[in-house]
Image (cartoon, grey):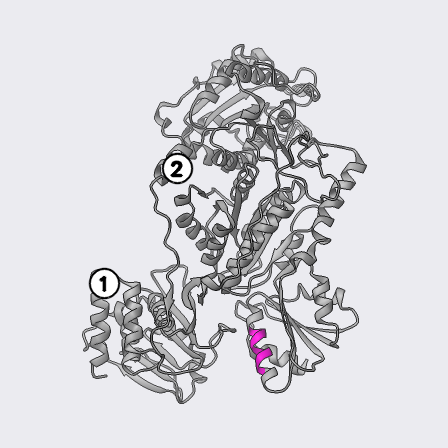
Amino acid sequence: MALSLMEGNEAIARGALAAGCRFFAGYPITPATTVLNHMLNLLPPLGGICLQAEDEIASIGACLGASMSGLKVLTATSGPGISLYSEQISFAVGSEIPIVIVDVQRLGPSTGSATRGADGDVNFLRWGNSGGLPVIVLAPVNAADCFTLTVQAFNLAERFRCPVFLASNKEIAMTRESLDVAALQIPDIINRTAPPAGRPFLPFQVVEDQSVPDFLPIGCNVPVRQTSSTHGENGYITTDQQEIARILLRLKTKLESAVDTFSFYERFTAGESDTLIIAYGVTARAAKSVYKELTGAGKPVHLLILKTLWPVPENVICKAAENVKRVVVVEMNLGQYVREIERILGDKKVDFCGQMDGGLISPDKIREAVTYG
Amino acid sequence: MDSLLNNSRPPVFCPGCSHERITHSLDKAFQNMGLAGHEIAMVSDIGCSGLFDTFFNTHALHGLHGRALTYAAGLKLGRPDLNVVVTMGDGGQGIGGAHLLAACRRNLNLTLLVLNNFNFGMTGGQFSATTPPDAQVGSGFLNLLERPLDICQTARAAGAAYVTRCSGYRKDLDAEIQRAMEFEGFAVLDIWGVCPGRYTKRNRLTPKTIEASLAGLPAMEGPVAENVRKEYGRHYRELTADRKPAAEPQKIEAVYDAPQSGRREVVLLGSAGQRIITAGEILCLAGLFAGLNTTQKNEYNITVLRGLSISELILSPEEIDYTGIQRPKVVIALAREGVDRRKNLFKQLDSDALVLQADGVEVPDCSARILPMDLKSCGVKKPDWALASLGIMAGLGKIISPEMLAAALKIRFKGKTLDMALELVRKVGSCEM
């Protein structure tokens, strides 16, 4: 076994490369800047492009243009940049443009604290697009996840033609840690699907059991239409309510009905316990140390670490909570994802353990919440 | 070549709108250039200029208001051979001003047609970035308060390599569009026209008055001598053609045994300029040489040349879950700024913890063992104190061994820097403290 020392942002950049990413555009913002630095180091030697754009709106705009040209694209920012991305995120959702977006979360609201961690954007990522259609959000726990979940994120963006977020956190992104790169479980690479020959190409057409349209890049030898306007299968603006309803419902169900195929999580059970801890992101690490400690001390507790946050992996959550009476949701904000758990596990006692002060939630605090409620 | 106009989607402009003439001039330019539809991408955004992409049998990318140039940049970088034509209105120039400036500075080979009709036609004739102050508009008196923007002067000042200001009624508009498209670089055409649906209902503007206004302005047509330069994409490819692939992450095999077992936490408390972060990294690398898991969490001010600098390190044979500091075994106090920020830490120190205290740095009362380091008389300069502290730790066999430290230095530094670092840690290891 050989170990490397790597921060989460570098692991994301290297994961993107492994996934086939060849275009990055970003705008400097702490704590996401080092993704830009690493992509600038990694991409040009491979013939890829790394662009420092004039602002965040342009960063993601350039990515959308490059994605439509057929490239796999990445951008990275923090909460204040996600705000500016918002109008373009809606475009990517509605017009099915594959893109991976890294949100290295920092303490908000607003410019907040540039160098303090938080998980305050997890609902913003889900709901920060006009129209409110679903997106995919994955949450890494450590540098290894930063690498492998980035590859997964690209695969999902290609498979579903949609924006996929990595909800990172300053505490993962800028913390260096030892990592056995050779031991990483890298999934097979998925690329967007070209249409079969012989059928006239319609940019948003699905046939038979397809839920995602085939893709041709702008610049290929068949003219391709892309538009942010409400469109029909042909990519032209439409007022046909039946067609609009059909397409928009498809945008919702293509992700929500498939979430079982990309529900990433870790589950730890030990002995008899009526309590389940649910955590995600860097907080899951403190939760895991509490799990180990309590279980080792003969007071077992179950732990579910969610790595797919949106769409909510309801089946995973229900199964993990099957035999417990009480669930403790731990998150680095003042209560966001806990609402989803309350919605799903209405028959359980759901306790919340949160913190929003720029510091990590400590194992002591979680242990106290688990032990004393 | 045949017309690229889309027969099933004829132009839908208001009668008398100059946009329709421009549509036909653009089609003629495409024909004159002998282009097929798949060789062109029309990129547009919001407003009547945003209808253009539907009138042509070409690639099309229609997006958000004022952002057309952002998509065009990514598209052109991804497909350098594609002819990318961007249509935007005067409204788009206002909301997307930063993108116009960036496009001018960047000089990607794009052709921007600004369909300038001096108002927001689609939303009710409100004033735009180019509306004259004396015009009657849908925003009441507000345009009296703001000066209109001269798109061409702005583009030129921002570095646009090709700028033309002209009338949409110009007879050879197709030829001028063709010249702009054939120019290798960012070309801006500020094309003046009338908006019969909104603007000319309350303002007098005709092809003749446009002609007269243009005649009163300094001519702007074609390449801007002082801005002509290499096209961005070509330049980018030239600059990156010979780049060697980035190095793979350094992989370190365990070759030594760590002096102690279990989770060990170390905190370096210093100030900017003391190379605290580098010392922290070296400690982690030293840990890797003993097969330990490590984490490094840093804290420093945004003004990197002033104020505190702190590095929190964990070395452990077990998986490191929580990355926060709980019970540090070693605290290295190198500057007041760092100590002040973590003064609460000292209260929690166990009696078997060690505080390495640099000369002149006060530390709060605590139960840990305090080892003063007289680095000055050992001949160590302040920027080397952090590294020297690692030498002292290694000399004491605390968490790392001298072999682990030397191996880390050899992987982190080269040449003269390495020699000096090795000499430094050897010297302090043997120095009387």
| Contact check, label 2 and label 1, Cβ < 8 Å | no
Q: Which mark is residue B236?
A: 2
| Depth check, front residue: A206 or B260 | A206
* Span highlighted in magenta in the image: A286-293
Point 55% across, 75% down: residue: A362
| Depth check, front residue: A330 or B126 | A330
Q: Residue B73 placed where, x, y %?
A: 50, 35
Tell me, yes or no, whether the highlighted magenta stretch contains residue A328.
Answer: no
| Depth check, front residue: A362 or B145 | A362
Q: Residue B350 placed where, x, y %?
A: 43, 87
Judging from the image, what secondary structure is the residue with disc 2 in? helix
Label 2 amino acid?
Tyr
Judging from the image, what secondary structure is the residue with disc 1 in? helix
Which corner quadrant of the image does residue A344 belong to?
A: bottom right
Q: Label 2: chain?
A: B
Of the 4 image quadrants, the one containing the C terminus of chain B is bottom left
Label 1 amino acid?
Thr
How many numbered marks are there? 2
Is residue B293 in view from this perspective?
yes
Which corner quadrant of the image does residue B284 belong to?
A: bottom left
Tell me, yes or no, whether the highlighted magenta stretch contains residue A287.
Answer: yes
Of mark 2 and mark 1, the one earlier in the sequence is 2
Of the 4 image quadrants, the one containing the N terminus of chain B is top right
- Disc 2 crowd, CA 10 A, few/some/many (<14, 14-19, 20+): some
Compared with B222, A359 (above or below) is: below
Which corner quadrant of the image does residue B55 belong to?
A: top right
Q: Residue A298 placed where, x, y %?
A: 62, 87
Compared with A13, B20 (above or below) is: above
Query: Which residue is denoted by mark 1 in the rendering?
Result: B417
